[in-house]
Image: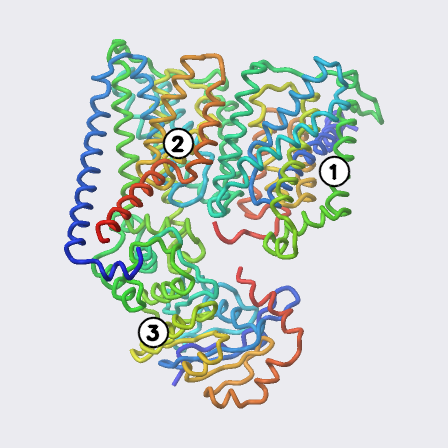
Amino acid sequence: MSPLGTQVVQAVVDGVLTGGVYALMAAGLTLIFGVMDIINIAQGILVVLGAYLSYLLSVHLGLDLFVGLVVTVPALFVVGVVVEWAFMRRLAERERTAMSILVTYAVALVIEGLLSVGFGTNYVELNAWYVNRSVHLLGFYLPDIYLFGFALAAVLLGALYAVLYRTRFGASVRASLQDRTAARLVGVNVERVATICFGLGVAVTAAGGMVFGATNAFNPNSGYDLISRLLTIVILGGLGSVGGALGAAVLMLVIEDVVAVVWSPIWSDVVFFAVLVAVLSVRPVGLFGRTLSRAQ
Amino acid sequence: MTDVAALAEPRDLEQVRARRSALVKGARGAFWAAFCALLLAFPVIFPNPTVTSIAVFTVIFMTAATAWNAFSGYSGYIALGHAAFFGTGAYTLAVISTDIHMAPGYGVFSLVPLGGLVAAAAAVPIGLIALRTRRHTFVVLTIAIFFIFQLLATNLSFTGGSSGEATPAPAWSAGGYNDRFYYAGLVCLAVAVAVTLLIRRSRFGLQLLAIRDDEDRAAGLGVAVTRVKLVAFVASAFSVGMVGALYAYFLGQIYPQFAFDPLFDLSVALMAFLGGLGTVSGPLLGALLLEPLQQYFTLQFSASDLYLVVYGALFLAVILFMPRGVVPTVAGALAARRERRAERGRA
Amino acid sequence: MTPLLEVSGVSKSFGGLRALDNCSIAVAEGEIAGLIGPNGSGKTTLFNVITGYVRPDSGTVAFRGLPVPAASPAGVFRLGIGRTFQITRIFGRLSVMENMLVATQRHESWWRSVARSAASRAERGRAAELLEFVGLARFAGTPAGRLSYGQRKLLELAYVLVADPAVVLLDEPAGGVNPTLVNEIAERVRELNRAGKTFLIVEHNMELVMSLCHRVTVMHQGAAIVSGPPEAVRADPRVLDAYLGGEDDELVGAGGDARG
């Protein structure tokens, strides 16, 4: 294979592996949207918060990053539940779209400010024995952390799937996803489902944040870049569709990595967003979306 | 107001009410006159350069919030990519004034409306694409377009890349230096407010408000929805582009991350929301409250991001206690009080 | 004489559900035509086809003998076909008067619409007259969202009338409205009809349909099966069959009510 060809294949492999982690974070976002009809702009900064929590645990307590998840995932679940309880359920039905975006944006600001005050704006990275190692397989270098991260994402997505499709609670969630009013009529406590889903959707950012922090240097400003990518992914995947988010995440990360190799890393970001604009100018409902909402 | 009460209302009471509403109108007129006078006289009353510098930023954001509200507040489409127009205006002034070696001074201000025009021109294709989508998708699309602009500014050569672009530095004395920018900003503000008033009072504005409430029904009644949305979007981009250009000239040097700042849209949206979305005075009030606060925090705790916390917390508090924003809440309370008084007068 | 509004052989499927099946109806100028049928028989879908909200798979709609091109709702409205919705669609945050003025649309360029105040004196006067007519004049300044359900129906009727359409399609004008207001609405319709306005009404309240309409058409499984004077329709055995017949009609309802 030509050197470029090898690089492209390597980029595709990298894209799939990192795409898995983005899929996990995007799944949380799209789950929250599907159940509550709101977009959680704070999802990006919550990923960063998750990364900082892992950072604290690994630097100060010497906990392994993956072991630390036992603490950070429940911690972010609680954060999500608190945010939902304190703000989201108080939003009036009519202005929900606009207000939810601004409220979660404001929540993001508060978190970003607190992180900046607490940690400063210098970039930090998560470290562990597997962060800078890689295995050599079939001529490709596969960083251990990519493999571990992908495995983690697969496990958690599998768990999410099991919860959604194999439990009573999951049935309530899916009912709420389809029609809140109907779900309420058949006895689903939609408010509680919403709170738990918000918590779950945020909890996955702890895992996403840990892998993100181990593969990228980050600071409190990293949330903007993350949220814009995650939003692009969930829109392309069709809002509310967990499967669509998975497909879109892997597709977008592969495109980005391949563009970085064949063209330039500088333009890969532009291409990332340009794909969204191009797709939506042809298909306003996204790649995998089906319905166009009727009213504003 | 029950219909029985309306029927029973005696003639003279109606006159009392008419006189009272005339009084309210008069008071409102007097308030606005005083407000404008204060705006005009501000640099004379407070000549301190630190204060006038804050005033310049405040006027810029009053304009931006007003312009943002003219589209998003009235149409219900929450745009979070107006920073793209702000940055386009800023780069228009910076690039052109540098490329044609413009002499520093008043002449550069002539590029301010040009910044608005270029931003408006950019808004046409953006609007045509983005306005086909609705609600969340629209919001995300505007954010994505904003990031494309930011990345282009960072990576294209004619913008000076990440090292930014300098604007001509006028040799005005430090004393009245800020005043010139302040008054230029007031002109932009007047344009933005005039556009808003024109929209609010016209048939066009009614169409825009109808779109906010039920777009499909408005279309069914013969409102040319795409055109109405697009015109409002472009008009909004124009004012934002103007103050973007002014901002670049005022700062003297612009960088991609300042001209295309993701916080910009949140700031203007918070201002409009705090004051009251879809009102004329709301965004003005919101910007008057928030921008000096932000500038104060930046000056006081220069390195810290504490103001983000205060900013966010303030907004959350407003949502919890005044979900409609300050102006509509206060106006509603006043109207309720007038109603109660009238009720009492009748009894 | 050509009917004012004529639907010929219209079919429409949603997925596998056949909401309209070769449906034909005609409405003559100056009459109040009723459209009844069991839930899911395709009445609302037919309305949506006529008013341009749904594109039929086949068949044509003609207005004054000329085919209505597969147009937008706005285009159909401009031709002179107004409609109200089963669930009223008013502009909740605009005042009642402003709701009326939104419907006062003329063909004009956007810059003229910017330069113009929300409405001329004549247009305001006309709107006020219509509000008076439906008994909502005293609510002119009230946000429409605060009106009761029945009042919303009256408002929707009033603002559809602003544009002076030749024919008005009413989708369940009496649905969920208290009896006093039902009479009120019926009275308004009669009065307008006496002044020459044509109506096509979908309604479940049989008493209202039978007393109000000059001619009633019964729909069943997406097609018009019977049409005639109220007494004749009431006596027709096929109508009873349609109402008591197959349960699977409800299936079509899912598609028939999909209003896009």
Q: Quadrant of residue C138?
A: bottom left
Query: Judging from the image, what secondary structure is the residue with disc 3 in?
Result: helix
Q: How far is mark 3 from mark 1, CA to CA?
A: 60 Å
Query: Closer to the observer: label 3 or label 1?
Result: 3
| Residue annotated with mark 3 | C188
| Residue annotated with mark 1 | A157
| Neighbour tally class for label 3: few under 14, some 14-19, many 20 plus, Cα within 10 Å | some
What chain does mark 1 sit on? A
Q: Are marks 3 and 1 in contact (CB under 8 Å)?
A: no
Q: Can you give x and y, in whole percent of width and height, for residue A59 in the image?
A: 70, 13
What chain does mark 3 sit on? C
Query: Closer to the observer: label 2 or label 3?
Result: 3
Compared to residue A216, the image places residue C101 above or below, namely: below
What chain does mark 2 sit on? B
Q: Can you give x and y, in whole percent of width and height, for residue B203 in the image?
A: 29, 51
Depth check, front residue: B259 or B73: B73
